Image (tube, helix red, strand yellow):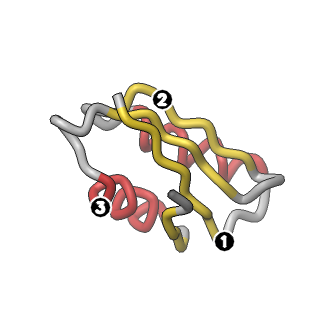
């Protein structure tokens, strides 16, 4: 498993964080997603043999948020 931290822009409330986590956790290869509205960040644990960083970023963008990797 690999861990990835992302900076999220455009979240307006905690429901935004729940939407991001829900979409990511429904994706094959993602073990967990913990999004913090207060920090405007998400940390994703994933199996890099099934999904890569760019696909994770694309999912967050599809939900409607700007995103940049922190690590």
Q: Is residue 40 above or below residue 29?
A: below
Dot 2 falls on a residue whose secondary structure is: strand
Callout 2: 10 Å neighbours few (<14), some, many (20+)?
Answer: some
Task: State the residue at coordinates (53%, 73%).
Answer: 66
Question: Which of the two residues, 37 or 44, is positioned nearer the viewer here?
Answer: 44
* Quarter assignment of residue 48: top left
Say which element carries label 3: helix
Provide the residue designation for mark 2: 32
State the CA–CA distance, disc 3 to disc 1: 19 Å
In the displayed orientation, state which residue is furthest to the right.
38
Where is residue 23? Give x, y as percent.
44, 43
Numbered circle sitting on residue 27: none
Q: Nearer the viewer, mark 3 or mark 1?
A: 3
Identify which residue is drawn at 56% across, 61% down: 70
Which residue is at the far front?
71
Name the element at disc 1: loop
The residues tagged by marks 2 and 1 sit, at their Cα atoms, a distance apart of 21 Å
Measuring from the top left, give residue 6's x and y in whole percent.
Answer: 55, 57
Q: Which mark is on residue 54?
A: 3
Pointer 1 local density, CA inside 10 Å: few below 14, some 14–19, many at least 20 = few
> Image check: 9 left or right of 64?
right
| Residue hosting label 1 | 10
First-in-chain label (2 vs 1): 1
Nearest to N terminus: mark 2 or mark 3: 2
Rounded to the nearest angstrom, the CA distance separating label 2 from label 3 is 17 Å
Q: How many numbered tags mark residues here?
A: 3
In which quadrant of the rendered view does residue 41 lie?
bottom right
At 51% across and 57% down in the image, what residue appears?
71
For residue 17, side relative to residue 53 (left or right): right
């Amino acid at each position: 498993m690999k861990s990835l931290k992302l900076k999220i822009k455009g979240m307006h409330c905690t429901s935004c964080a729940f939407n991001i986590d829900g979409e990511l956790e429904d994706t094959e290869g993602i073990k967990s997603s913990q999004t913090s509205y207060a920090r405007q960040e998400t940390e994703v644990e994933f199996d890099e043999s099934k999904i890569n960083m760019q696909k994770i970023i694309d999912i967050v963008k599809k939900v409607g948020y700007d995103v940049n990797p922190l690590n």
